[in-house]
Amino acid sequence: MNLIDIPNFINNYITKRETSLFENDIEAHKETLSQKIAGKSVLVIGGAGTIGSSYIKAILKFKPRKLYVVDTNENGLTELTRQLRSDANMYVPDDFKTYPMNFGDPVFKKMFLAEDTFHIVANFAAHKHVRSEKDKYSIEAMIDNNVFKAQAFLDLLVTKKPEHFFCVSTDKAANPVNVMGASKKLMEEVIMAYSSDLQITTARFANVAFSNGSLLAGYIERLFQNQPISCPSDVQRFFVSPEESGQICMLACMLGNSGEIFFPKLAAEQMAYFKAITIDFFKASNRPIFECASEEEAKQKALTTKEGDPYPVYFFDTDTSGEKLYEEFFTATDVVDQETYSSLGVIKNARKLSQEAINKTILELKALMDSGDYDKTAIVNLLKKHLPDFEHIETGKSLDQKM
């Protein structure tokens, strides 16, 4: 199997940028970033994932004194540690620890309260996939992680306030059409309710090319297992590299004013279709593709495909619930600053409800889920009540029903 240089492929075929989109802003604010990070203590939740680990690598360049990383993925934490420790150019503070635990568990609270106040706290723990929207159980788990646990963590943070708190969002929170996006929009409103009491920022950003669990990362696994590739032909997305994903979060965390939402300044013409990326992926691999008419044909074709044969690929028009054909970072009612930073836009007027109003919404959601008498539609309708711009796309099909 001819494995291509993934970072090089991202730069040349996906982002089409030789240097980071955020390089100029990092350079322009280097002194400020150093003042805010050097010698400080940092806590990163969800730090074993693509974005969290990229944030860690971005922030370590400014030499914090202490770094604790929390994630439920024990193997991911092990690999993160190996990456950091094996890189001759990587600074790792003497006080570096990883904890395989859930930030909503009692043991996390014990650790957090026992430590001195963390100066910088970043939360990347999230259900991030549209495919997590299946039924009432998967949705409840998503809302519990993205909203309920996020609020409980904010209540904990208020007792030991950091200098900077960042909580990751998603482009899908702008005019959400799926429950994942709606849960992140609600998460934004939760953190905004605390933004007068804590220094809080967030960021919406594009797809992270070849991130863990992404469609593109799945191509590599399918190739290793000689399984067919399946790809939507009509979906286009903005993309950033893994490195860029950490940098935007660092910039938003350290430079933003409380209550601001950051996003990358990308023009509509910079969106790319997954189909075009897939075709380029195989061209860069010097391997032709065989376009199949169905999933079944693709699977059968893969059984007899040998090294060097055209690879079976099935392109389809998307038909699953909550799938948006394009991306957007802000809405027509948002007040947006596109002047302060060369690579970042900032939403300045995010809705800031009172904590009482947010608590009422949370209690309504919990009461519905605790009632035992609810289904996916009931949760969606309740979310619509509290999120007026939520227009759910329901097709009756989940991504778990596809390759």
Image (tube, grey):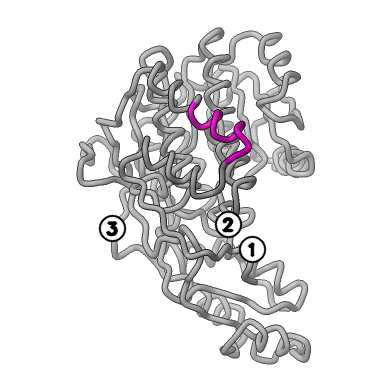
Q: Residue at x 51, y 54 (%)?
A: 208
Q: Please identify the quarter of the rendering in which residue 115 is found.
A: top right
Is residue 166 within the magenta segment?
no
Tag shown at residue 108: none
Q: Judge the density around disc 2: few (<14), some (14-19), many (≥20) Cα neighbours within 10 Å.
A: many
Whichever of callouts 3 and 2 sits on the residue coming sooner in the sequence is 2
Is residue 368 within the magenta segment?
yes
Indicate the amino acid at tag 2.
Answer: Arg
List the residue tagged with mark 1: 400
Whichever of callouts 1 and 2 sits on the residue coming sooner in the sequence is 2
Pointer 3 and pointer 1: residues touching (CB < 8 Å)? no
User: Which image quarter is the C terminus in?
Assistant: bottom right
Separation of marks 1 and 2 at Cα, in angstroms? 7 Å
Q: Residue at x 46, y 60 (%)?
A: 394
Indicate the amino acid at tag 1.
Answer: Asp
Separation of marks 3 and 2 at Cα, in angstroms? 27 Å
Locate residue 306 relative to residue 196 in the image: left or right: right
Q: Position of residue 185 (x, y in %)?
A: 41, 39
Locate residue 124 relative to residue 99 in the image: left or right: left
Magenta span of residues = 364-373
List the residue tagged with mark 2: 131
Viewer-side residue, 88 vs 198: 198
Q: Position of residue 45 (x, y in %)?
A: 62, 30
Indicate the amino acid at tag 3.
Answer: Ala
Q: Secondary structure at mark 1?
A: helix
List the residue tagged with mark 3: 267
Q: Secondary structure at mark 3?
A: loop
